[in-house]
């Protein structure tokens, strides 16, 4: 009998997760999603995926692992809002560390071949002198979100050393593209684009000279898919490797739209990171991965998708 590789995607109704699930299903994998729909959307769920509306901290997850016997686990479910992590660090810890540990315990117990973890670059390295930042840079997270993501990376290492549970960590830059949640901090392109096409004003905090490294979701999905095949533990940055200011992002959106967008400038947020740009050399070397979408193409795709949503 033909055996289909079984894959669990936690957070598979979310922005990156739902795009990943679609791609895995196109490649004929049998996909199960666990998501509590706290920010994910039912309409983004691929109808060919099995779906469990559950919290990752729940013990009910044991039954799903026992019956499904997954080959691979993509762990993407997370509390992703940096500001929420600052106001409620215990909650962030509960989802991003304890929830993750629940998944790891079941992966260990039911013989999962590999766990692929969606970690973060900017929030883990913090303000750093090394730009573009390599995976070897010291890690000084400036938020509970960054601390908890880093803590979970260390648990992955521990489970590998102690129980031989294989893993790969991808540290994403700022991901953008279709289906991105418009709240939260990482979504500046989503927010600017959505407001622009609705004729609404976007708020820009600070002088707009703060920089980020924006990588398109389709490229992130291709990195995630490649990650399950490689024999490499440790961390791999997934980025465009291009440092872009928010002012440049605004100008790029205006160029594609052919009109000015409405921006209200507010004082910079306390403790906001000034620069972020990740080196992608290691991704090329160990994952044979390079992004295919530059900022122009990615913004065009995002605008087309956003326009289609309001029609
Ligand atoms: N978007 C980015 O720029 C970015 C950058 C770095 C890392 N990441 C990481 O990538 C992953 C996916 O992020 P995203 O941007 O798609 O965010 P998202 O909010 O769209 O996706 C997260 C998903 O997890 C689900 N979820 C949240 N808490 C849960 C819980 N307790 N139990 C079950 N499901 C839960 C949400 O409903 C959502 O569908 C996260 O781990 C995030 O930390 C994202």
Image (spheres, rainbow, N blue to C red):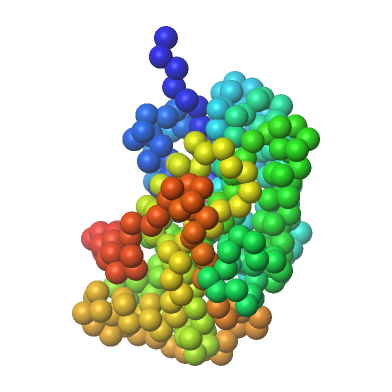
Q: Which residue: 56% across, 38% down?
A: 231
**Residue drawn at x 49%, y 36% as measured from the top left:** 229
Relative depth, front residue between 218 and 310? 218
Image spot of residue 282 (x, y percent): 52, 55
Q: How many marks?
A: 0
Q: Position of residue 125 (x, y in %)?
A: 64, 67
Q: Is residue 62 visible?
A: yes
Query: Which residue is outermost to the front?
Result: 285
Question: What is the residue that sits farthest to the left in this orientation?
Answer: 258
Left or right of 19 in this view: 151: right
Q: Quadrant of residue 59?
A: top right
Q: Where is residue 207? Give x, y as percent.
A: 49, 90
Task: Specify whether 292 is left or right of 241.
Answer: left
Location of the C terminus by quadrant is bottom left
Where is residue 268, by image quadrant?
bottom right
| Viewer-proximal residue among 92 and 255 | 255
- Depicted 9 relative to depicted 39: above or below: above
Q: Residue at x 25, y 62 (%)?
A: 304
In the figure, is residue 6 to the left or right of 103?
A: left
- Quarter of the image for the N terminus: give it: top left
Query: Looking at the image, which is closer to me, 268 or 13?
Result: 268
Q: Which is more toward the observer, 262 or 155? A: 155
User: x and y percent of residue 111 in the render?
Assistant: 65, 25
Q: Residue at x 24, y 74 (%)?
A: 256
Is residue 306 in view?
Answer: no
């Amino acid at each position: 009998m033909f055996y289909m590789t079984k894959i669990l995607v936690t957070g598979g109704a979310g922005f990156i997760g739902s795009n990943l699930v679609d791609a895995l299903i196109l490649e004929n994998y049998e996909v199960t999603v666990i998501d509590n729909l706290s920010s994910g959307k039912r309409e983004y769920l691929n109808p060919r995926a099995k779906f469990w509306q559950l919290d990752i901290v729940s013990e009910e997850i044991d039954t799903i692992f026992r019956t499904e016997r997954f080959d691979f686990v993509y762990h993407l479910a997370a509390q992703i809002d940096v500001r929420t992590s600052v106001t409620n660090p215990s909650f962030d810890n509960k989802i991003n560390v304890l929830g993750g540990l629940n998944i790891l315990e079941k992966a260990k117990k039911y013989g999962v071949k590999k766990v692929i973890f969606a970690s973060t670059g900017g929030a883990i390295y913090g303000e750093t002198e090394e730009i573009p930042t390599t995976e070897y840079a010291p890690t000084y997270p400036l938020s509970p979100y960054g601390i908890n993501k880093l803590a979970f990376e260390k648990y992955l290492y521990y489970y590998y050393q102690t129980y031989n549970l294989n893993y790969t960590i991808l540290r994403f830059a700022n991901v953008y593209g279709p289906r991105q949640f418009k709240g939260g901090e990482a979504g500046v392109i989503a927010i600017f684009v959505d407001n622009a096409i609705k004729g609404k004003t976007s708020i820009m905090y600070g002088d707009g000279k703060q920089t980020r490294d924006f990588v398109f979701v389709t490229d992130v999905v291709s990195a995630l898919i490649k990650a399950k095949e490689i024999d490499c533990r440790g961390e791999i940055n997934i980025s465009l490797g291009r440092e872009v200011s928010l002012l440049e992002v605004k100008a790029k959106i205006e160029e594609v739209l052919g009109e000015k967008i409405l921006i209200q400038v507010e004082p910079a947020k306390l403790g906001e990171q000034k620069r972020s740009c990740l080196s992608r050399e290691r991704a090329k070397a160990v994952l044979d991965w390079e992004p295919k979408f530059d900022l122009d193409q990615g913004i065009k795709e995002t605008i087309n998708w956003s326009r289609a949503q309001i029609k």
